[in-house]
Image (spheres, rainbow, N blue to C red):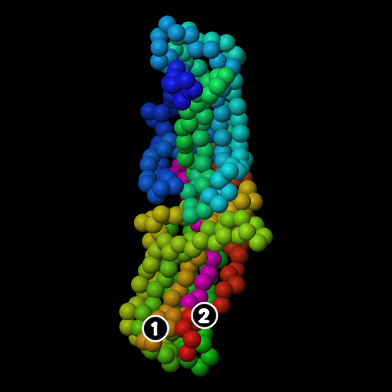
Amino acid sequence: MSFFGFGQSADIDIILNDAETRKKAEHKSEDGKKDKYFLFYDGETVSGKVNVTLKYPGKRLEHSGIKVEFIGQIELYYDRGNRHEFVSLVKDLARPGELTQSQTFDFEFTHVEKPYESYTGQNVKLRYFLRATVGQRLNDISKEKDIVVHTLSTYPELNSSIKMEVGIEDCLHIEFEYNKSKYHLKDVIVGKIYFLLVRIKIKHMELDIIRRETTGTGPSVYHENDTIAKYEIMDGAPVRGESIPIRLFLAGYEMTPTMRDVNKKFSVRYYLNLVLVDEEERRYFKQQEITLWRKGDVVRKSTSHHSVIASQRFEGSSNPDKSGCQSNEDHES
């Protein structure tokens, strides 16, 4: 919108060169709606065309330059005024001058580093987008086009199992074991629960997957916990010596890879939460962090090296942090 009642004198459109063949991925927007966007990986080239269409043929469009940008940006919802750019690339398409007719400009950003996964959370949004701008004296004419980035990771075969105990002295002693500590997003969590001592009447037991989003630093740290999945292990009282198998398929749930200290702005971690409820509605739980990662259908030669670097930066060390959570009872007896 310009002053004096005049609207914009041109429309801008951004068209990707491989739009007909490039895969799309669903991504949730801030308002919770899902849409499909073109999918890219770290190290891939982003190229296309910027179409500037004059609304009034025969009328000249004066401009102070035409450019296209590729931007990777983190926005914290409690700090809306500050957008943190971790990738910012610019291509000048035209010097200051005038357009006498509609025109198309080619652009190419070669082997662009895209170190983090696209993410929309409770308190933070990480997005990648192209922005084309026709500079004007009063108001620039601009258009943005979002893309989605997925990070592909590779992990060694060494993937230790998780063994833990839940105990209340002289009342309850349970051991549980999960087959590994790192899972890809379409993996299956396989485990077993052993009841070694049961002197309280347990009526319900479930395994939850919890996503914990952490934003901010120091005194301004915000934690948001979301229960992604609930898996009922048993409904009824177990007996001593009983063992119950666990088999939880991850493919049906909306999850991202584990993100640790992304650009020193936020983290997204996942936990397995074992919950027991007794007949007096007291709840006992034990939590353990797991690492989630995205396995590519086809790892492309041009991106595999970048992906390994990104996975190291993205996931941290190969050993998952041991959760310091203790078994708890949230009902005062």
Q: Residue furthest right?
A: 218
Q: Mainly helix, strand or loop, the magenta region?
A: strand
Left or right of 325 on screen, residue 228: left
Quarter of the image for residue 193 reads bottom left
Q: Which mark is residue 218?
A: none
Quarter of the image for residue 222 reads bottom right
- State the residue at coordinates (39%, 57%): 253
The residue type indicated by label 2 comes to Asn
> In the image, which residues are magenta?
285-298
Q: Position of residue 230 (x, y in %)?
A: 38, 67
Up the image or down, 198 lies above or below 51; here it is below
* SS of the residue under disc 2: strand
Q: Position of residue 241 (x, y in %)?
A: 41, 87
CA gap, disc 1 and disc 2:
13 Å
* SS of the residue under disc 1: loop
Q: Which mark is residue 281?
A: 1
- State the residue at coordinates (46%, 32%): 145
**Along the viewing direction, whichever of 201 and 178 lies nearer the viewer:** 201
**Residue, disc 2:** 328
